[in-house]
Amino acid sequence: MKLRWSLLCWQLRQVSVVTIAAMLLSVWFVLTYHDPLKFDIMTWAPFFILAHCSLLTWRLGRVRSRSFGFLYGQGFSRDTLWLHTMLASGVSVLAVWLPAALLVWSGLRSDYQEMMQNYWFPLMAETEGAFILWSLLAYAVLLPVFHYCWIRAAQPTRGTTGGFAIAIGAVFGAFSIWNSVRVPDMPTWTVLLFAGGFVLATISLSLGGMRLHRRLEVI
Amino acid sequence: MKKPSIEITDLVREFGTLRAVDKVSLEVAAGQILALLGPNGAGKTTLLRILAGLLAPTAGESRVLDRQSFPPCPSVAGRIGCLIDGVEPPGGVRVCQILDLKASASLGFDRRRAKQLCEAHEIGLNRRWRSLSKGQKRWVLAVSCLVAGAEVLLLDEPADGLDPSARHELYGLLREEANERDAAVIVASHILSDVERVADEVAILRRGRVQLRGNLEDLRERVREVEFATDASPSIPPGARPLGHDDDSGTLWLVYDNAADADSPLPGELQRRTVNLERLYLAITEHREKPEPDGSDRLEPASSV
């Protein structure tokens, strides 16, 4: 599989509106949010990530749309199409979070908050970098799950619920594990176990999605 | 004889309780053009979608370039050009982006020729898809398939919306692809005059089944339209099968096993004529409008001439 720029651009065009809207929202929020950015105590961030993942997979996985049928009839191999769909999702995530990360890491957010006479700043600025990394980790877990769902739902032997039960289960599972990990004094081996579980789930859902994608039906 | 580029054996596709394709068997060799004819809902588009690797067959087998059509084989995907009815790019993309996309998926895409063919029809490469007329959209999609160097072409209503001269040009290009590049072509169309001009073989589908398939010349020699008095009850001679029957006009369409028997008069017949493709198509599809009182299907399925 090699990178096809025209295909990547085609897929990015599908998610351009979602990406631009999410990017503006994240930049605005990161710049103006007056409390320290901490992934584990903020409720908006997981919901923002969930919404972004849902919109990305909805735009890229509309199996019954005319444009989807057109793209899949062009002669690309299924693996190539899958790779570029995942790449387009990844590029969208980076486009949304890179400007926000730059605001945090360059100190612009800190300076702005200090200018607004926020008493937390500039003291907290350096601790906020982890927030971006945790957000990206959440995408790494959720995106393969969401992509797996629409791919599974479009199989010739699909059931009535497709893979959406898996998605709902995975999201609840991720939040439950996340809450357990945050318990103070958690032994290191438990944290490593959960982390290993996340990595394994991400890899297996990615590979499973790629494999099922070869048998995807375009109706 | 060349090995068939497309082989379909007892192919079935069901959508819930609807059987859209029903035990279809066909072969298309390299350099051959097969025209798929049939009324709306006959199963033509479903058949082409299966061959293009977009749909899985429920039963039977479909092979393209010696590989199963579903799941699509990576080494074959780029060697197939398909124009499927009902799919199109998003409205905001430009013509050049559509051609670029096709070029990156195909092995032998001829950009210069694609540009020439679009510009000859006053379609600028920077025009957006939504700004094109129906015929221009069809032309762009057809051109992108025809210049891609594909070994198999699957075209669903390629001339839909084209003006007569563009249609003429399109089918000329199609013939060229088949003759010079040895492409195997299946074209589904309702425009019988075009089909008659370019197709080597025709297959007429009805209710998902192939009712008649054969070489156009053979069909002309072996199919006859016979008129009887309306109160007569003609008997079918040995070596012939009925294709359709119109009680109101007393007309019977017969296909003979041997061309030599096709002009032997039957008792009680008033007139006997050779038929063109249009009459043959109407004979078979008209039969559909007048099923037997018991609901049975009088036509023999998949008769090959």
Image (cartoon, rainbow, N blue to C red):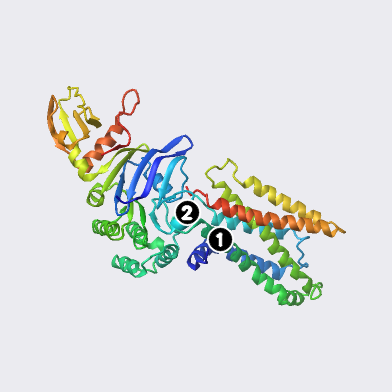
Disc 2 versus disc 1: distance between alpha carbons? 16 Å
Work out whether residue B201 or residue A171 is closer to the camera in this orientation and state it.
B201
Find the residue positioned furthest to the right.
A185
Instruction: Count up the numbered dots.
Output: 2
The answer to whether residue A182 of the structure is visible from this angle is no
- Mark 2 and 1 residues: CB-CB less than 8 Å, in contact? no
Q: Nearer the viewer, residue B116 or B222?
A: B222
Label 1: chain letter: A
Front in this rendered view, residue B95 or B254: B254
Dot in front, 2 or 1 = 2
**What label does residue B73 carry, if any?**
2
B200 to the left or right of B226? right
What SS does tag 1 mark?
helix
Which mark is drawn over residue B259?
none
| Residue B195 shows up from this direction | yes
Give coordinates of residue B228: x percent, y percent.
15, 27
Image-quadrant location for residue B202: top left
Q: Residue at x 22, y 41 (%)?
A: B219
User: For residue B181, which quarter of the picture?
Assistant: bottom left
Q: Give the residue type that dot 2 points to.
A: Cys
The quarter of the picture where the C terminus of chain B appears is top left
**Residue A71 on image: x %, y %:** 46, 57
Mark 1: amino acid: Leu
User: Element at badge 2?
Assistant: loop
Chain of residue at mark 2: B
Label 1 Cα crowd, 10 Å radius (few <14 / some 14-19 / many 20+) = some
Looking at the picture, does residue B105 appear above or below residue B59? Answer: below
* Discs 2 and 1 carry the same chain letter: no
- Residue A83 image label: 1
Return the x and y of residue B301 as percentages of the image width and height: 33, 34
